[in-house]
Image: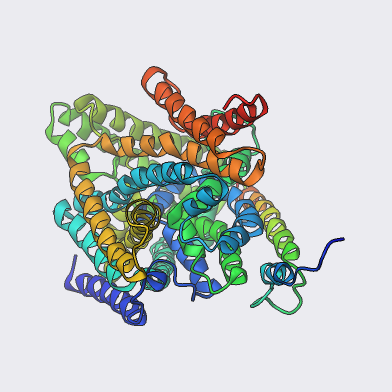
Amino acid sequence: MSWLDWTVLALTQLLIVVYGVWKSRQDRDMESYLRSRTMSWFTVGLSIMATQASAITFLSAPGLAYEEGMRFVQFYFGLPIAMVILSAFAVPLYYRLNVYTAYEFLEKRFDVKTRTLAAVLFLTQRGLAAGFTIFAPSLILSSLLGWNIYYTNLVIGGIVIIYTVTGGTRAVARTQKTQMAIILAGMVLAAWYVVKGLPDGVGMEGALTLAGKLGRLETIDWTFDLENRYTIWSGLLGGTFLMLSYFGTDQSQVQRYLGGQSIAQSRMGLLFNGLLKIPMQFAILFVGALVFAFYVFQAPPVFFNKVVAEETRQGAAGDQFVAIESAFAEAAAARKAAALNVLQQPEDAAAVEALREKQAAVDGLREEAKSLIKQGNPAADTNDINYIFLTYVFDFLPAGLVGLIISVIFSASMSSTSSELQALASTTVVDVYKRLMKPAATEQDCYQVSRWATVGWGVYAIIFAMFANRLGTLIEAVNILGSLVYGTILGIFMVAFLFKQVGARAVFLSALLSEVLILGLFFYSDLPFLWYNVVGCVVVVVASLVGTKLRFW
Amino acid sequence: MELHNPAKTNEKAVEESLEGMPAFVRSWRQVYVFLLLFLVLLVLVFSWFSEVWR
């Protein structure tokens, strides 16, 4: 990175943190630190979006569009539906009960046992997830730039801890607003530069023609296929449940919209997210499709993770890998010639068919390279999707803009982590410290403990991020851990909202049963872990209802 | 006989308040329907977009 990139990175990050902390310098009590009902719908909406969009969103999505097209956008189709349901039912309820955390509602509806169970499940899962939010971009940046991953973890985690502890909820929301502005500016500039970098005479229309003919602009898949991860049906059905669970029961999101000035402002913030999220995700994927068109004219590497590619080159199968790279370069050149032919006669079916054949050859060689990498090192990660966009950034963007894109990644990582730390601190203080350990604690006690809890969870997240580097499989373990508890929490909330006849004892025992069953599935079955979410939710709801009906619980 | 409860009425009014919304919006239900129609519109636009460049 040049001195200009370092300057842009340092200035943007400094600006974000100083602005957020300065604007919230008056917040010195528990109410303003943990909830701060002062935010407009615009701040709430941007804060919700910034919390959901982690660094991986901006690294993975363009890579996904490059590799498979834009069908990933369907994953978000359930989001507007979930926003409507939560605005209509959850927001007024949380306001009416005047809660700090989503889990307080469970005590009012059931009892303290159920509240504590849900809070502990959340703390377990979200604590590790916060570490992963820091670790994932650090890993990619250290791999591409040769940065020390420990220092990267420390810088990202350290800055977040400083402004979250100093300014609380309002600082988090205000920094997220600035972070979103940096993120959007960076992505728009990157898209503009991709188009600018295309050969003379190609332009946006040529890029769209090529990306479209090669399937990179496919968005909607109407087939009903359970094996296919992204279809309109999985987006509408599965996506609605997932978003209801995430936005309705995860404190990192609930805390965002409880910070609204009023019910109306909180609702508008949620609906603003429902309105903008899909177009924003479409735009990020669109950048990936443009990068794909760009690489039709600039031969791409056969494998985008340069460190892994170099290890393979130096390994036992190095000669074979170099041979594949050479064949890949020839196939990419043939694809470029076919692409230029298509641009001259886009309606010529034979020309389009020839281009698709050349693309198939390029794809085939990429798969061969991945197989070879796996043969040489079975532990190597052959998924290089996260590296595609950043490889383009480092190889082709001018000085200054590279710094801005790194700032985008830092901002996205920090905006998610700050919400997670705040949610962990508020749950620790409200649901554990004040409720179970020191009910007589004053507001000032709670404010001080909240700040220490934020530091504690931040340090915990950084330590996890440090260890995650050594234990590669731990990343998958975090996702599995989330699935081990998310279904049960959603089930508890669904019973609370929908089935008034179910009492505390029934839902608590059903939640325990659900966790035992999920752990049984985890240890003794081959069921893919994403299904644990569905199983957990269904078991809690059905067992509560049946147990209540039969007076079994 | 059901007695009028001012606290309950006030709570309902707060929950239904459209503070900050443009004047032509009459209820939250209208906003929800608009958002769901917007989702349908997006699906149709995306389908058309893919079809045009296929």
For the point 61% across and 51% down, which residue is it? A82
Quadrant of the image occupied by residue A52? bottom left
The residue located at (66%, 51%) in the rendering is B43
**Closer to us: B21 or A488:** A488
Residue at 59% over, 24% down: A552
x, y percentage for residue A199? 41, 61
Task: Point out residue A109 in the picture as x, y percentages from the top left corner.
Answer: 57, 48
Drawn side of residue A187 relative to residue A263, left or right? left
Residue closer to the observer: A87 or B35? A87
The residue lying at 51 percent from left, 64 percent from top is A257
Front residue of this view, candidates A114 and A135:
A114
Left or right placement of residue A157 versus residue A363 in this view: left
Q: Is residue A129 above or below residue A320?
A: below
The image shows residue A346 at horizontal and vertical percentages of 58, 50
Image quadrant where residue A169 sits: bottom left
Q: Is residue B16 left or right of residue A327?
A: right
